Image (cartoon, grey):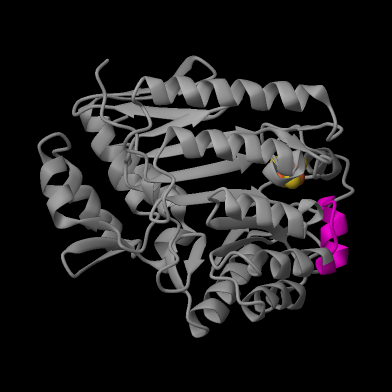
Amino acid sequence: MSHDSYRALYIHIPFCVSRCNYCDFTTQALDSASPVIDEYVEQLVLQIRKKAKEGELSKIDTVYIGGGTPSYIGSSRLSMLLYTLSLSLRLEPDVECSMEANPESIDERLIRDIWALGVNRLSIGVQSFDDDVLAILGRAHSGLDAQRAIEYAQERLDNISVDLIAGIPGQSVESFAKSVQKAIDLGVKHISVYPLTIEPHTPFYKQVMRGELPEVDEDDQARHMEIAEKLLVEQGFERYEVASYAKPGYVCKHNCAYWTGLPYLGLGRSAATMTQNASRRMRIQDGQVTDDLNKAQMYAEDIMLRMRMSAGVADTLVAQAADELPQIYEVLASLEDRGFIEHTDNAWRPTELGWLCGNELYGDIFDLAP
Ligand code: SF4
């Protein structure tokens, strides 16, 4: 189908030093010297060049190299990838170029090389600064490694994000709060706080099944999320999305592209591509169509995704959607009655309760166009 220009580019690096106990991402633990990684990166280079030749990269505003652990593949492979990107699209300072990295594979040389080749935002998978909690998660780094990695990164990069996990069995409120405070004290500009989910086929899942690990306690998790919000907002962060906090000027543009319905191109194993025009939206992963939405479903999805963000859904978008979703005002009124959303400044915005009861909030909107 003829489609709108892609605005965001995602590149997936599916390799890690070892597999964490909670992980269900597409990744594999492989020796970093493995020729499999060289071959994979070379294939990515060819794909980037091909897409550039086809004109698919001309409107890209954000690039995100995610994983897996991109930093694990090392400076020389990353340099090849970033050099190809710099020749294939407009990789200028106004284009956000994020890369994910884990503390155990960050050093001064890596930071210098990726900075020189255009990475201007680093997202570091810290998860916790508490060594006991890191051991439960099966992470390959200590709290001190995480602190050092942030400090190395700060020598070249200003825009640093840290991921933390909330509600881990065995993680006390104090431990979680200390990790949040540590990230703030280190001066990072963006913090994502994800509640732990225990996914099937992970070591955590098996431990829960065998009774060796307690299940996630939803009340603990909610308490952790409340603590994060309190600490972060008090110290100048804005909660602009259910799990994301940023200092002014440091919102992640790439993630906002996903939540505001901008088309994106994914390259690499299991990377999703979202292609759309005015009446149809498709998601494609590894050559398979995983979603094929009509116009009504596109509107429902746009409204649902925007409810993740504190900016919410503008009245103008609701008015446009009403032609395709005749029940929309009724559903919004019902969500407001239940305290999940509120109407302020010409937009419908999620409340704290709405985010806590996300399944109900998003589910009711999704059901407008099943
Ligand atoms: S580092 Fe991330 S992607 Fe790699 S195994 Fe751990 S959780 Fe999974």
Quadrant of the frame with the N terminus: top left
Residue 273: image x %, image y %?
44, 28
Q: Residue at x 18, y 70 (%)?
A: 345
Magenta segment's dominant SS is helix
Residue 6 appearing in the image: yes
Left or right: where does residue 255 sit relative to residue 101? left
Start and end of the magenta stretch?
131-144
Choose between 314 and 73: the one closer to the eye.
73
Determine whether 66 is above or below 142 in the image: above
Residue 310 is left or right of residue 273, and the answer is left
Image label count: 0
Which residue of the protein is positioned furthest toward the bottom in this rendering? Answer: 234
Q: Position of residue 232 (x, y in %)?
A: 54, 77
Ligand 1 is located in which of the four quadrants? Answer: top right
In this rendering, does residue 24 appear at all?
Answer: no
Where is residue 241? Give x, y as percent: 43, 60
Indicate whether 7 appears above or below 239. above
- Estimate the x, y position of residue 330 in percent, counting from the top left: 18, 49
Above or below, comparing residue 310 to residue 10 in the picture: below
